[in-house]
Image: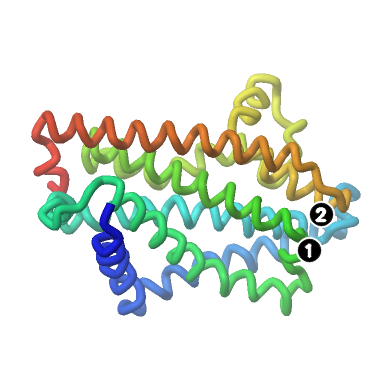
Amino acid sequence: MNFTRIYGLFLRHFYLITRSFPRILDLIYWPSIQITLWGFISNFFAEHSSYYSGAIGVILSCAILYDFLFRTSIGFNMLFLEEIWSRNFTNLFIAPMKISEIIISLVFTALIRALIGLVPAILLTSPLFGISLLELGMPLAFLFLSLYIFGITLGLFVSAGLLRFGPSFENIAWSTMFLLAPFGCIYYPVEILPGIFKTIAYALPLVYIFEETRNILVNSQVNYENIFNALYLNIFYLILAISIFYYSFDKARDKGTLINIGE
């Protein structure tokens, strides 16, 4: 593994982002608008709901965490799609770059994209709504780590689909998070779900992350079992996603479709 090549690909995407004002504006605009919107909704529910009356920031905190997940997943997909749209993906192997090096560079760049969009939005919550994610304490680091890993995992799954089925799979990149959102119990307890949906929810790390977020904010206590369950599931799905990505790449290369992936 050559870290110079990894750093080189990272710089390619980093410069594409930071040297383009429209790209930066796009990364900052949507998270800021969404967090502001959910901030007002959170205040409304805090005043009219007994469940959230003791913790004004529950809905807003969950919205921020969900947006971080969404930005990480979409960020990874967008970086991979940039290579496809520019028909540059196969050119990367002239370096020559390994698949592992491409994945690592996209993982770190996706984090930069997510932070560029999310940090300004988080900074808005304190002056506008008097809420800080720091109220979650040390468990916040584990919650963000779990969301980051799961976002990258979803990005790998979608990218594997793009390798296997081509650009026609692109629409899945935009719909994956919306498909999983109902099972993630982002804004409501898992008990709300019917039986079969609840079974699906417990198979995802999301439900443990957001249940623990509400548990900390509402009950002022930490259940590390939720945190560990989320991490265990994340490791399982990450290994599965990497395996499927490698399998899809090998299949695309064997069938000769890899060279036409940008068309």
Give me the residue at 77% from left, 55% from top: 58
In the picture, measured across the screen, residue 111 lies left or right of residue 251, that is right
On the image, the x and y values in percent for residue 183 come to 61, 34
Q: Residue furthest front?
A: 1
**Residue 113, label in figure:** none
**What mark, if any, has residue 135 been given in the picture?**
1
Quadrant in which residue 164 is drawn: top left
Res 124 quadrant in image: bottom right
Q: Nearer the viewer, residue 248 or 95?
A: 95
Q: Is residue 208 visible?
A: yes
Q: Nearer the viewer, residue 163 or 245?
A: 245
Residue at the top extreme of this rendering: 196
Q: Secondary structure at mark 1?
A: helix
Callout 2 amino acid: Leu
Residue 178 vertical position relative to residue 143 in the rendered view, above or below: above
Q: Which residue is mark 2?
A: 217
Query: Residue drawn 64% across and 68% down?
Result: 36
Residue lying at 40% horizontally and 47% vertically, measured from the top left: 174
| Labels 2 and 1 touching (C-beta < 8 A) | yes
Question: Callout 2 environment at 10 Å: few (<14), some (14 to 19), or many (20+)?
Answer: many
137 left or right of 11 in image: right
Can residue 49 be seen in this snapshot? Answer: no
Q: Position of residue 263 (x, y in %)?
A: 12, 47
- Disc 1: CA contacts within 10 A as few (<14), some (14-19) or many (>=20): some
| Amino acid type of the residue that numbered disc 1 sits on in the rendered structure | Glu
Q: Position of residue 211 (x, y in %)?
A: 73, 42
In the image, 33: left or right of 12?
A: right
Cα gap from disc 2 to disc 1, whole angstroms? 8 Å
